[in-house]
């Protein structure tokens, strides 16, 4: 699909929408779409607006592919910034899908920030995008980017020829002119609500995590019912975390689609490195993670590493085996053996066998998420915990260490989300015994879907303290 086709479709869509573009987005927060052809500095400018490095930036065209929304504040006013992939005329394949995502962002925006590389000037592609924006009926702010000093300001004046109004010289890299640009943005957006610092309860936050091409974006799209995340058979299409409010099991959840993790963060480079960092940040912001695995392929070392990443972060966990519709009887038997052999350490995690393509068993995700989150927040009363511990230790005392058997004095639950326990003893407990205590905790109290932390605190004897 080329830019002219997008222009015609945009015009037709907007003609049928009436006045829907005149007010702020749902929730009262206006939306600003940042558009332009590839590698003009859109994501760098988004980071400048946000005041932090949130969007992936690399000196390579086409790094941003999905449309990705961020909350921004300027002069005490809140609005949503949507970073988009580059528009290219006569795009084909993946590039055409990226252009469609940019067009979808335009359809839902209250205003548009059109970014042009001033050092290059207005190209044919820029002029084609300008025609789309003319037909859209949206207010447009023209950002003449890469004006790093006064000498290049004159080049920005040439962009008046696009017929989109005054070009605002700005340097996304250095911040030059960004204040004036943001003042102009707020002037065209609907009245934005004042920023509030009151924390409100919201939907439970779910991170979709897995290695590339296991179907994370396909699953999100299936649940949402539209192509919210860009899907392509090229592994690694998603690079920024994509947030979406979705309805699963009759209630609203905040799903975060993340970039596929190929390797450890320290081993990644370029866009992959920053995508890995954002995936780690998305996991930190989530309460529970759905780790998606490809059921038609052997469980890999990277799958196991991603699961470890979730448990080490202390997040609740659900394992989802995708592409279940592709499995024959032999593969199912092999998979069961792989799960016992490779995933025995997380045997406590709920497992759902799904198909993102057909929607098979996706309705079972909500009960699994609830199970994990309930366990994640479970607290055992101290009296009950110590009665249980006394019984367990009496039946199976800890092994001796240095010829002496350490006495287990008492235990307390130090926290939840995840459950954390502290066991007070007169001596060190071997790791095998700590694993034994964890196993017995799970057998007697459940804790399905959550990691458990058990730490040992050795109390010094009175004569040693004297």
Image (tube, grey):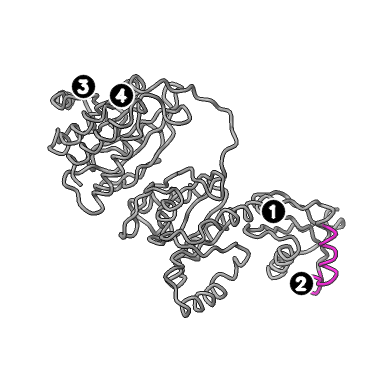
Residue sitting nearer the eye, 256 or 425: 256
Task: Report the residue marked by disc 4.
Answer: 181
Secondary structure state at the residue bearing disc 2: loop
Mark 1 burial class by Cα count in 10 Å: few <14, some 14-19, many 20+: some
The answer to whether the residues at label 2 and label 3 have Cβ atoms under 8 Å apart is: no
Residue sitting nearer the eye, 363 or 308: 363
* Numbered tag placed on residue 401 in the rendering: 2
Task: Report the residue marked by disc 1.
Answer: 420
- Determine the CA span between mark 2 and mark 1: 25 Å
Secondary structure state at the residue bearing disc 1: strand
Q: Mark 2 vs mark 4: give the one in front.
A: 4
In the displayed structure image, the side of residue 229 where residue 320 appears, left or right: right
Residue 72's spot in the image, x, y percent?
42, 31
Q: Is residue 400 magenta?
A: yes
Q: Which residues are magenta?
A: 386-405
- Determine the CA span between mark 2 and mark 4: 69 Å
Q: Mark 3 vs mark 1: give the one in front.
A: 3
Q: Mark 4 vs mark 3: give the one in front.
A: 3
């Amino acid at each position: 699909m080329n830019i002219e086709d997008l222009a015609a479709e945009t015009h037709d869509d907007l003609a049928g929408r009436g006045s829907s573009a005149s007010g702020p987005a749902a929730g009262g927060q206006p939306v600003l779409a940042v558009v332009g052809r590839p590698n003009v500095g859109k994501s760098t400018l988004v980071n400048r607006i946000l005041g932090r490095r949130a969007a992936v930036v690399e000196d390579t065209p086409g790094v941003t592919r999905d449309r990705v929304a961020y909350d921004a504040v300027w002069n005490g006013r809140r609005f949503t910034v949507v970073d988009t992939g580059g528009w290219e005329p006569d795009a084909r394949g993946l590039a055409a899908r990226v252009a469609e995502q940019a067009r979808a962002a335009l359809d839902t925006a209250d205003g548009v920030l059109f970014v042009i590389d001033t050092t290059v000037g207005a190209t044919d592609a820029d002029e084609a995008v300008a025609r789309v924006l003319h037909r859209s009926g949206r207010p447009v702010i023209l950002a003449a980017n890469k004006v790093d000093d006064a000498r290049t300001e004159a080049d920005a004046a040439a962009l008046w020829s696009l017929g989109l109004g005054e070009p605002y010289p700005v340097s996304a890299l250095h911040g030059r002119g960004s204040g004036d640009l943001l003042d102009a943005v707020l002037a065209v957006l609907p009245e934005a609500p004042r920023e509030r610092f009151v924390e409100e309860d919201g939907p439970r936050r779910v991170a979709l995590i897995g290695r590339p091409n296991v179907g994370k974006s396909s699953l999100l799209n299936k649940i949402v019912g539209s192509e919210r995340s860009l899907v392509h058979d090229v592994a690694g299409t998603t690079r920024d975390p994509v947030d979406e409010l979705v309805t699963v099991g009759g209630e609203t959840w905040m799903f975060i689609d993340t970039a596929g993790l190929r390797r450890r963060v320290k081993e990644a480079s370029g866009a992959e490195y920053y995508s890995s960092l954002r995936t780690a940040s998305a996991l930190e912001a989530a309460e529970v993670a759905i780790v998606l695995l490809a059921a038609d392929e052997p469980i890999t070392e990277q799958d196991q590493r991603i699961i470890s990443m979730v448990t080490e972060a202390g997040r609740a966990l659900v394992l989802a085996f995708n592409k279940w519709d592709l499995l024959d009887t032999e593969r199912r038997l092999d998979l069961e053996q792989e799960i016992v052999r490779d995933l025995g350490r997380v045997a406590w995690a709920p497992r759902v066998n799904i198909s993102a393509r057909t929607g098979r068993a996706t309705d079972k995700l909500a009960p699994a998420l609830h199970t994990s989150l309930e366990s994640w927040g479970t607290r055992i009363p101290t009296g009950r915990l110590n009665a249980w511990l006394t019984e367990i230790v009496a039946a199976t005392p800890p092994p001796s260490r240095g010829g002496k058997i350490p006495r287990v004095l008492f235990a307390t639950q130090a926290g939840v989300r995840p459950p954390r326990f502290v066991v007070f003893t007169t001596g060190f407990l071997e790791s095998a015994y700590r694993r034994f205590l964890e196993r017995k905790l799970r057998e007697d109290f459940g804790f399905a879907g959550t990691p458990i932390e058990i730490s040992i605190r050795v109390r010094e004897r009175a004569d040693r303290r004297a």
